[in-house]
Amino acid sequence: MKYRRVEGLTGALAALLAAVAVAACGDSNGIEDTSAEAAPQVDASGPVEGELTISQWPLYVDPGQKGTVAEFERDTGVDVKWVEEINDNVEIFGKLQPQLANGESGGRSLITVSDWLARKMADLGYIQRLDYEQLPNVEANLLPSLQDPAADPEREFTVPWQSGMTGLIVNTQLAPDVDSICDLFDPKYKGKVDLLTELRDTVPMTLKCMGIDPDTASTEDYLAAIDKIDEAADAGQIRRFTGNDYIRDLASGNVAFVLGWSGDAVQLHKDDPKIEFVMPREGCMLWSTSMEVPVGAPNPAAAEAFMNFVYDPEVQADIAEYVGYVTPVEGVQEIIEKRDPKLAKSELIFPTEEYTANCSFEPVLGGKQGREVTEAFEKVVTGG
């Protein structure tokens, strides 16, 4: 009998599987062949005022009265409710899906999920097409490399909040020699590692350990990687599958290292210099989390005003200094160079092509392949 590895995710994963089934018209690359015709158009023509509820991940904006949110409130008079309720994509989708299916957002006017999930939500009519007349800063300053992602080729529905890398976050005192994804499966660290509940991080990174390129991997390759993860979980190698809350395991010393996200390593390193991001020699996963306006958003005008505000390079520089993720805005590195020349050289905020040479972009995984792989991974994560 397999033990239950993650509580409370079964319903969320089931909801996502149902969404995949509804949206799936997959091509050979696993990306839905659809124009997301169900998605409505944002009406952001109203006044920028009132209350704006933003659904976000933890540690994802510079805080306090001098921070970005407070500055936006002072500039616009909008009252922002910043809700750190996202731990992983599947979990938040399970929470939002029943409301969104009824055309309601639960009071949220802006949400932030990974591009692959935004694609599925657009196909289901859960998020709205953006009004770029209200987004001049986005049009002027979005990095060219992020303008045409596979999940949203024309950025009709999504504006990147931050980008980042999935690699190893290591307590260098407990695991000083770790430099490979395969180290996660080394019995030397049995019970002292966490893997992510995010399929599109954990499984492609395992493929890299197996010497398989995620960009060309077959369904059989993905299932073989899931088998490898399952065997490790059954053997007690993996302490748990987790979202952003692996932060607690690292801070407490419960794990030696985790599969995790680059900006979290920056935050953790500030509090404990022993904790560092390590780029695996096999490479990383590259991804973006993006802002979306959900159906039923009560204040789309303020939502788009906030999107536009954070694409001012000076504002984005404040965010980048704090969160330590890859900034999606042009001109930020030059600003930070004047503020903090050392930070301007950070490969975690401004990665070079050489640093990310072996990295792959997070896959969408749609259609039949997406259903098969998601179902198999669900059984491993939940111990089903």
Image: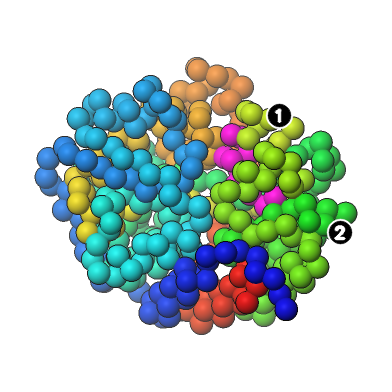
* Residue 10 vs residue 263, the one in the foreground: 10
Q: Which residue is mark 1?
A: 273
Three-letter amino acid code at the position of disc 2: Pro
Magenta stretch bounds = 257-267
Instruction: Decide if residue 142 is on the left or right side of residue 29.
Output: left
Numbered-mark total = 2
Q: Secondary structure at mark 2?
A: helix
Where is 269 relative to 118, above or below? above
Q: Residue 130, which numbered label? A: none
Q: Residues within 10 Å of mark 1 (few under 14, many from 20)?
A: few
277 magenta-colored: no
Whole-angstrom CA distance, mark 1 to mark 2, is 26 Å
Could you tell me which residue is drawn at 19 percent across and 51 percent down? 298
Residue indicated by mark 2: 187
Q: Amino acid at mark 1?
A: Pro
- 361 over 51 or under it: above or below: below
Q: Quadrant of the N terminus?
A: bottom right
Q: Is residue 263 magenta?
A: yes
- Horizontal side of 72 relative to 360 (left or right) equals left
Tell me which residue sits at (22%, 40%) in the image. 51
Report x, y in % for residue 132: 24, 48
Q: Is residue 177 above or below residue 219?
A: above
